[in-house]
Amino acid sequence: MDTICALVLAAGDGKRMKSRHPKVLCEVLFKPMLRWVTDSIAAAGIDDVCAVVAPDADEVLAVLPKDCATAVQANKLGTGHAVMMAADYLEAHRGGSVLVLNGDAPFVDGETIRQALAEHRKEGNDLTVVTARLEEPFGYGRIIRNEQDGLSAIVEERDADEKTRLVQEVNSGVYWFEVDFLLDALGKLGTDNAQGEYYLTDTVGIAVAEGRPTGIYRAMSPDVILGANSRGELAVLNETARRRVLARHLDAGVNIPFPETVVIDPDTVIGRDTTVLPGCILRGCAIGEGCTVGPYSVLTSVTVGDGAEVAQSTGEGAAIGSGARIGPYARLRPGTVIGDRAKIGNFVEVKNSTIGEGSSAAHLTYLGDSDVGREVNIGCGVVTANYDGKEKLRTVIGDRAFVGCNTNFIAPVSAGAGSIIAAGTTVTDDVPEDALAVGRARQKNREGWAKVHGKYRR
């Protein structure tokens, strides 16, 4: 059988991170480290995955791919023990190759996984270890090569002597195994080491002693081994990832003139000639070409059409059309769709609403649960009162309507196409097309009343 699968070790807790949550859920650029790993596995073309998790690991299960198998490691007795817990999964994959890696090493990329497999298959190995060279290798298992420059052993930091600690080639924690060999080797692991644990790295010694073919694939970038055991180290991972993502966008033609304060997550897509200004945070967005985003815009799961501008505004779960202008200081909430060339100006909040092509709400307005047509003018201080205390109700405003300042729509209500709503109106009934609606009390002046009764009488 020429099959491949992957085993992700994800049963660690968050004690060293001073967290109530499992370590693999610590985020790098707003994305759990475990998700980085599973996404890289998918990018390498591996669909069959099993994760070794702790008991009651509902949080971890929530971020795993839906079709990911799981095995439970109740007692933390080392990496070898973690793999033992997935013995049933491995038994079902005899005859194939299995990738084994840690769920807290976010920079293991799909290309490294593919290249290591190619080397593994080319050399006919039972075991191939992915390594990297570090100037400061403290804390990592050292790779010991034999006289033929092949793999001889992996020695953990705690078990290394002074000479071994000088070795700069280290174990990344990423392996390709032939499943049949791995199952056989698991039964031969012992706990004769400084930690009293079952080390997966001891499979190397077993393979060498039995004369089985083993090999090394040295990764192009040492980043593949990077992990974190403290919040400070996690901050280093975030900065490393941030710079890598920015470099990718710059190479693709995105203009980021002052990158020091820009944060873009790895899943955001940005078109060429778009400018991202200082202070922006972009998460899971798809931004078109020739846009201007920022300064100081925070967008999450927002799509932005070509040529749009989003200045000093926030958005979540929204869609912005081509040529639209947003901000400054606008807020787009989930379910919002802004049409092409529309304008949402300063201190305007839009929630679960559709704003038609060419329409404008320039300032100080709340549009919630509304359907606004094309080329509608929304004046200052307009509010759609969408909640009656029991349920959310919608307001509909037709094409080319004109809504004067300080208008309140009491949903459910509609204003027809071409209608005009006078300033200060409270709309409680539907307004027909091309009608004028005036819903305010007639002004009455009482001469001299203020002089007698007013608070600031002269």
Image (cartoon, grey):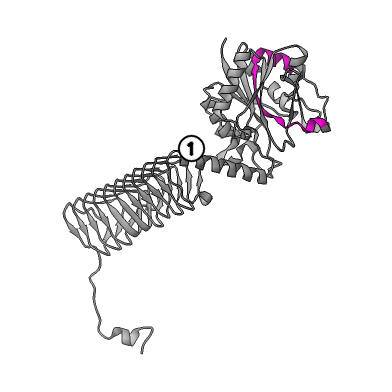
Residue 140 is a magenta residue? no
In the rendered image, which quarter contains the C terminus?
bottom left
Residue 169 is a magenta residue? yes
Q: Classify mark 1: helix, strand or loop.
A: loop
Vertical comparison of 3 with 17: above or below? above
Q: Which residue is mark 1?
A: 267
Vertical comparison of 331 with 136: above or below? below
Residue 377 figure quarter = bottom left
- Of the residues shown, which amino acid type is indicated by label 1? Asp
Question: Residue 204 appears at what percent x and percent y?
Answer: 73, 20
Q: Nearer the viewer, residue 335 or 211?
A: 211
Residue 26 figure quarter = top right
Can residue 180 be seen here? The reply is yes
Q: On the rendered structure, is 310 left or right of 123?
A: left
Question: Residue 242 appears at what percent x and percent y?
Answer: 55, 43
Residue 63 figure quarter = top right
Q: Which span is picked out in magenta?
A: 163-186
